[in-house]
Amino acid sequence: MCSLAGAGVLTVGLTAFPTAAQAQTPVLCSEGSLVDAIATANAAGGDTLLLLPFCTYRLTSAHGRGPAGPVGLPPITSPITLLGMGSTITRDPSAPAFRVMEVEGAANVPSTKGQLSMVGVTVSGGSAVPPYPGGGISNLGGTVSLVSSGVTGNTAVAGAGIYTDNGSVSLTTSSVSGNTATTRGGGIYVNSGGVNLLASTVGGNAPDNCAPSGSVPGCS
């Protein structure tokens, strides 16, 4: 297990939501509502989406395709914040293989500025189509920030939980656990870019937690 600052993941009740007043778009507890909300946010240049507390958004089919195969939700190409409170975004076990989320940035997809921020949300059940990496979240040149969130139970050839290439990832009071890769990086795989852990844990992933060795400070 890998951790920093000796702190575990905060409980939902301790999730820190932004205190400043800001516009938020509520998202009903359904696959279609979440897909439409993200597509609309991308078209509008970004948005803050308020997920229904304790809702499980169950994805039964892929609703997008990026440079690395099918994606459950539309690839994120603008600044999008998902505010949840015990909310889960998961691929239905009976669905075809696809990763759950993909963030696209200019480094890999020209003219895009994908930024994903998640608070109090769990991403699970993703299964990236071989030979593509990134079962839960694939970050292709964008920015990913997880706060009091989790990435668990995802599979891929590499980076089963999180895969990042030419982008940045930060985890605060979050966890990456129970993910399985067929090669390396069961929890996190860094092709390029950086990953920062703050009071977060990466543990219980197979065959390892982070790869390549030394790519994620505080994780092995």
Image (spheres, rainbow, N blue to C red):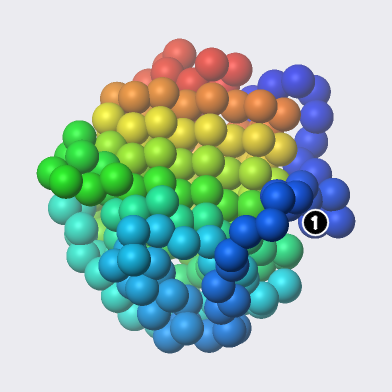
Q: Amino acid at mark 1?
A: Val
* Residue nearer the viewer, 204 or 98: 98
Q: Quadrant of residue 113?
A: top left
Alpha-carbon neighbours of circle 1 within 10 Å: few (<14), some, or many (≥20)? some
Q: Is residue 76 visible?
A: no
- Is 57 rendered above or below residue 22? below
- Which residue in the protein does label 1 denote? 12
Task: Tell me residue 77's x, y (percent).
Answer: 29, 54
Task: Tell me residue 9's x, y (percent).
Answer: 76, 41
Q: Is residue 132 visible?
A: yes
* Residue nearer the viewer, 63 or 38: 38
Query: Is 167 displayed left or right of 5 in the figure?
Result: left
- Is 126 rendered above or below residue 28? above
Residue at screen point 20% across, 39% down: 106
Screen quadrant of the N terminus: top right
* Residue nearer the viewer, 184 or 56: 56
Residue at screen point 70% across, 22% down: 4
- Is 203 rendered above or below residue 91? above
Residue at screen point 80% across, 23% down: 6
Task: Tell me residue 206's x, y (percent).
Answer: 50, 40
* Residue nearer the viewer, 42 or 178: 42
